[in-house]
Amino acid sequence: MWIPYMLVASCFAWWGFANCITDPLVKVFKDIYNDLSHTESALIQFAFYAAYFCLAIPGGLINRKFSYKHGILSGLGISMVGCFLFYPASLSNNFYTFLIAFYVLASGLAVLETAASPYILSLGAAETATQRLNLAGAFVPTGSIVGILISKYFVLERLELLGTQSNDLSSRQLQAEQLSIVIMPYVLAGFVLVLVWLLVLSVRIQKPSDLVASKSDKVDFIPAVKRLLGNCNYLFAVVAQFFYVGVQISVWTFTIHYVTEQLGIKDSEALNYQTAALVAFMLARFICTGLMTFIRPSTLLLVMALAGVGCCLVVIFVGGAVGVYALVGISACMSLMFPTIFGLGTKGLGEDIKFGSSGLIMAILGGALIPLFQAGLVDVANVNYSYAVPMVCFLVIACFALFSHRIPASEPTT
């Protein structure tokens, strides 16, 4: 199963790429449309992550009625359409039309992730499922690093160069040039997704049990939902995932704001620290995956959540270069959290995992809502104190780790 495993795991890079090329645009769009507040520009993240909430259940239904392969192909196809929508959005020269493109792009990612994560969990023993998902998740920071580098060299630096050469341009012409720079990576990514879609179409990625399950036309949605609602571990995992995605998107969205304020450097230079954060995220993911051979995932999750609380306190109350280093350290603390919460939350679900994965993907709504709270604190206070929001999120994740620790890895949950 290594060929389908690696092919599906490589799809994880796409949501890492999309997340990190989008995060800096919250500040970029505020500069392009300078009448926007921080909260209004953060609607980019709201549109992006609200799509996960809306499309996760349809994605789960596709998996249950057809197969994981249909879910993966559907997700890639919708994302492809979203990428191409950035071109007409730029022609309209209206901020809110871009929100539609972000929404469609993320809708495809929601369907893709709803299929890919449970598929990876299904390819082996239950005792190593969380470790296996963490290994596949190592592709996420790889895509994230590519996304942030493209954002730095092909978006922010080109926008800064355009700013020094814009004396002869009207404000409308300048906006058109800026938007053409912003959309280019998305349009090119759309063409790459066409190739990925064709590759997935040509490879058999189902496992035998998935093929058997797909023969039934009956979708037992209501009974499955009742079983899931009666599973305390699963419900707590959904809550923890909501706060985890919220903390990840908040931390990475406002990294540029914090670093430029603390160090007095340009946006493109601040992305060097975000790149360092992503490298720390990736390295910590590999280290934690290895440590799971000897340490229970719930224990590691608890340690990293408490370390995240400590880093947030440094960011809030110390600041300066030390605060920036602590901000980079937060990414290392977050490295194992999404796949670990996903794996711990789906213990013992059996066939219900096809619907259960939808709830855990819907929890990505946290990435839409929590950054708005942090943006509001930036508007009314300052970026330092806004990191109290991520600190609270880490405390919730720590509580889930303690709760889940009592359940053995192979034990059915109720």
Image (tube, grey):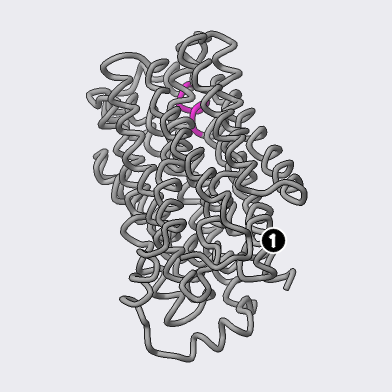
Tell me residue 209's x, y (percent).
59, 83
Residue 52 appears in view: yes
Q: Residues within 10 Å of mark 1 (few under 14, many from 20)?
A: some
Q: Please tell me which residue lies in front, 170 or 22.
A: 22
In percent of width and height, residue 331 lies at: 58, 32
| Helix, strand or loop at mark 1 | helix
Q: Residue at x 53, y 43 (%)?
A: 402
Give residue 348's position: percent from left, percent from top.
54, 67
Residue for point 42% across, 23% down: 387
Q: Is residue 174 visible in the rendered structure shown here? A: no
Q: Which residue is mark 1?
A: 128
> Does 226 sit above or below residue 49?
below
Point out the stretch of residues depicted in magenta: 155-160
Answer with left or right where residue 210 lies relative to residue 61: right
Q: Main secondary structure of the magenta part?
A: helix
In the image, taking residue 144 as reference, residue 251 lies left or right, namely: left
**Where's residue 182, x and y in %?**
43, 38
